[in-house]
Image (cartoon, rainbow, N blue to C red):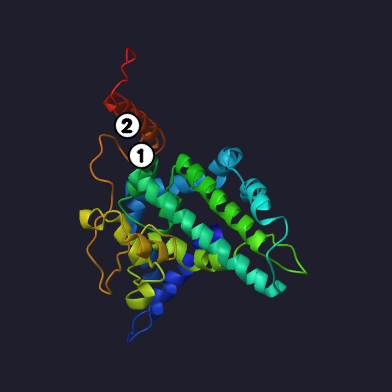
Amino acid sequence: SIFSLLSAFLVAACFIAFGRPRKRPVKMRTIVRALIPRRWLRSRSGRADLGLMAMNIFIAGGLIGWAIMSASFFESMMNIPLDRILGPKSLLVVPGAVLTVILTLSFYLAYELAYFVDHYLSHHIPVLWHFHKVHHTAETLSPVTNYRVHPIDSVVFYNLVALFVGVTLAIVRHVVSSPDRDANFEGANAILLVASYLLTHLHHSHMWIAFTGKLGRVVLSPAHHQLHHSADPSHFNRNFGNTLALFDFLAGTLRIPGKKRENLTFGAGALNYDPHGVTGLLVMPFCDAAEGVKRTAIQIPRVNRAI
């Protein structure tokens, strides 16, 4: 949201002003220049980020909303087999406060797992990669780059989130319940809300905020995600998670950054079209995906119908 974006700028400003000991206080003009460098505003990549931000905030949400299954839909579908296996009643009864904690943690873990799976598949399945590649064609990173997403990429992501969250909540409902409240989760998840305001947009910042050591094995910092965007082949397919490093650790895709800034180059490599224009951002992913499907179909040997 716009509010989480503003929060990211505030956190970044505090990092600039108080992150390192200085003899003199940092001037506001210096902070603004550090937060919004002129090279980003002048670059075609930065302007493309702003254009996609406007589209994704004001247009895409209304256009793709009909295509997204809700978590409640998947939860109701999962309830049918679970009712047959475990019965309609919950196995355990716990106090309402305990149920709230269980639901909050379950929702957060389900969302993080969905994010990791979607991100992993988007890098390993060619059809999905052509749409996700729009995000990686950013040659300069800023908090606004978080909005540099193709609508098809968003549709796949939100459906996966609905699937994982819906199935998780159905399982929780069959395992635990509370005598004073229903096992339905409504409203924003507290953990996700805090993570969104403190980390999500900063993952696409140009500032090297690195979590190292044990903390870097638990929480994915902005530096983690900068390595993910790096054009260096040694950094490819690393740090797929959102804010939690657990699933990257389990999958062997975690790469912890060092405290010292690395000299990174961003982008998706050489393309035969402009990756920052409207055609390159919105139309060419369909063309590339169709070409990839066609190429795969040609490579599949035809069945001999005479056999």
Label 1 sits on a secondary structure element that is helix
Which-is-in-front pick, marks 2 and 1?
2
Picture quadrant where residue 180 is located: bottom right
**Could you say which quadrant of the image residue 94 lies in?**
bottom right
> Residue 130, labelled with which disc?
1
For the N terminus, the quadrant is bottom right
Identify the residue at the far front of this view.
307
- Give the structural element (helix, strand or loop) at label 2: helix
Question: In this rendering, would 203 be left or right of 198?
Answer: left
Whether the residues at callouts 2 and 1 have beta carbons within 8 Å, the answer is: yes
Residue 33 visible at all: no
Q: To which residue does mark 2 refer?
A: 292
Residue at 38 percent of width and 51 percent of height: 120
Crowding near the residue tagged with mark 1, few <14, some 14–19, many ≥20 C-alpha atoms within 10 Å: many
Measure how far apart labels 2 and 1 are at the Cα level.
Answer: 9 Å
Locate residue 196, reporting x and y percent: 51, 63
- Kindly identify the amino acid type of the residue bearing the numbered disc 1: His
Residue beneath the point at 54% across and 63% down: 108
Q: Residues within 10 Å of mark 2 (few under 14, many from 20)?
A: some
Kindly identify which numbered label has been placed on residue 97.
none
- Could you say where residue 9 lies in the image, as x and y percent from the top left? 46, 66
For the point 24% across and 56% down, the residue is 265
* Quadrant location of the C terminus in the rendered image: top left
Measuring 66% from the left and 69% from the top, which residue is drawn there? 100
